[in-house]
Amino acid sequence: TPVTPDFSLSNSGAFTLIRPLNYNVVPKYNFIVTATDNGGNNDTTSVEIVVQDFDNLNPFFSHSLYQAVVPENQDGDLSEIRPEPIKAQDGDTGINMTITYSITSVSPSDYQANFNIDADTGVLTVVTSFDREEMDSSEISVNIK
């Protein structure tokens, strides 16, 4: 007899799904099923039900804030991002959906064109260097999908 409220087992041996399964809660069910006849003879077998995951969780960043120091008048990849390079991951297991990075805003907005992000890797680049006297800090918002 299943010990979960997700299934029922009929006398014919058919498993019936009682409610929708959620891979993120239980990815796999294992049952031991015993069949007994009127004479008391029986046999036992194992049943494994594997729940397939689907793309129902949003990707998420490893950290809520990343910081970098950009040397004045220098362009190129931001290599010293703390606490680590910008990284996002998909919450679903085995889906292997592609995560796409994009810059949603730069503050001050006059410097939007100075930055680029690789859509596939999340590597942030200074495309056009800037002078510290003109801009001493910037906030960049990154989106993932």
Image (tube, helix red, strand yellow):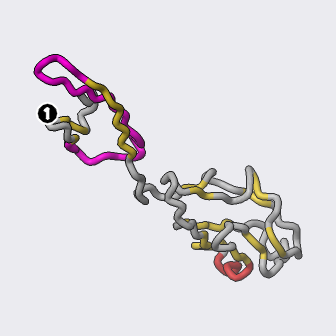
Residue at 83%, 74% in the rendered image = 76
In percent of width and height, residue 1 lies at 23, 28
Which residue is drawn at the image coordinates 30% and 26% (left, top)?
44
- In the image, residue 72 lies at what x, y percent? 88, 71
**Is 32 a magenta residue?**
yes
Kindly identify the residue that appears in the image at 88 percent across and 76 percent down: 73
Which quadrant would residue 18 be assigned to in this image?
A: top left
> In this view, which residue lies farthest toward the top?
40
Q: Is residue 92 left or right of residue 78?
A: left
Kindly identify which residue carries mark 1: 11
- Return the residue nearer the eye: 132 or 118: 118
Residue 35: image location, x then y, percent:
22, 27
Image x and y of residue 26, in percent: 39, 40
Q: Nearer the viewer, residue 63 or 56?
A: 56
Amino acid at the residue labelled 1: Asn
Judging depth in this view, the residue of 102 and 39 nearest the camera is 39
Give the magenta-colored segment's residue range: 16-42
Element marked by disc 1? loop
Q: Residue at x 74, y 50 (%)?
A: 83
